[in-house]
Image: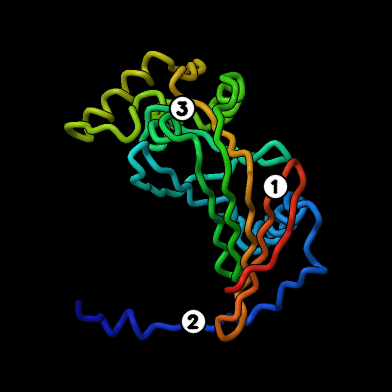
Amino acid sequence: MSETPEISALRREYVAAGLHRRDMAADPLAQFHGWMQGALEAHPDDATSMTLATADAAGWPAARIVLLKHFDHDGFCWFTDFRSEKGQHLQQNPKAELMFYWRGLERQVRIRGQVEQLPHADGETYFHQRPHGSQLSAAASVQSHAVDHRETLEQRVQTLGQRYAGQQVPCPETWGGYRLIPHQIEFWQGRENRLHDRFRYTRVEGQWQLERLQP
């Protein structure tokens, strides 16, 4: 395979300050909160964007961008259609990984763990916080499934819009939230000469253990 010079020659130097063990919080959720606050201040539009990686029962992986909607010591939450590809994967294999990449801060966070569905009431609450048009689109679409034409979707949305004009759109039973319960959380800080700083927290018998990883 021949290389493409325009790609293979690309380089980027990392110039951020280092990450030291003495600066790492004992609780990774506290560490994440601090990094998220920094990301929100630096790039609020993209701070909550995260890659969600799943795999089906046969081991085939899939990754996509979703938005973090809540996090606490119970886990990290997002919302979607349960019939989507990610929903099908999580039904077959309820393990996943999240990754945040904050380019301007030269930081990444990887979060791995078990995934569970949130109660339907949580999905309803968030669903009705969304703009009316987004509610209609979510109710009209069977996410990730094939459709013959865009016009088919637009017609469904129009029909629902007429049915629920001036009314609250019911949250479908097939739409709601997931929570990833973290088992490992890794914090990555870019450094000069690719000698990056990486720290990984792992939960062992209910306690978080911290170790430095080689870049």
Residue type at mark 2? Answer: Arg
Quadrant holding the N terminus: bottom left
Label 1 sits on residue: 203
Residue name at image x 49 percent, y 82 percent = 12
- Give residue 135's mark: 3
- Which residue is at the front of the view, 96 or 212? 212
Q: Is residue 205 left or right of residue 152?
A: right
Residue for badge 2: 12
Q: How far across and down, in percent of the image, does residue 153 sit?
A: 27, 29
- Label whose residue precedes the other's in the sequence (3 or 1): 3
Residue at (41, 49) in percent of width and height: 63
Between 41 and 179, the one nearer to me in the picture: 179
* Residue sitting at the far left: 148
Q: Amino acid at mark 1?
A: Arg
Amino acid beneath label 3:
Gln
Q: CA distance from mark 1 to mark 2?
A: 34 Å
Distance Cα–Cα, label 3 vs label 2:
41 Å
Q: Nearer the viewer, mark 1 or mark 2?
A: 1
Specify which label sits upstream in the sequence, 3 or 2. 2
Q: Residue at x 33, y 40 (%)?
A: 58
Q: Position of residue 125 (x, y in %)?
A: 61, 24
User: Is disc 3 surrounded by few (<14), some (14 to 19) or many (20+) residues within 10 Å?
Assistant: many
Relative to residue 151, is residue 211 drawn left or right?
right
- Mark 1: few/some/many CA within 10 Å (<14, 14-19, 20+): some
Q: What residue appears at the point 66 percent right and 56 percent down from the top-left corner?
A: 40
Q: Position of residue 189 (x, y in %)?
A: 63, 70
| Quarter residue 82 falls in | top left
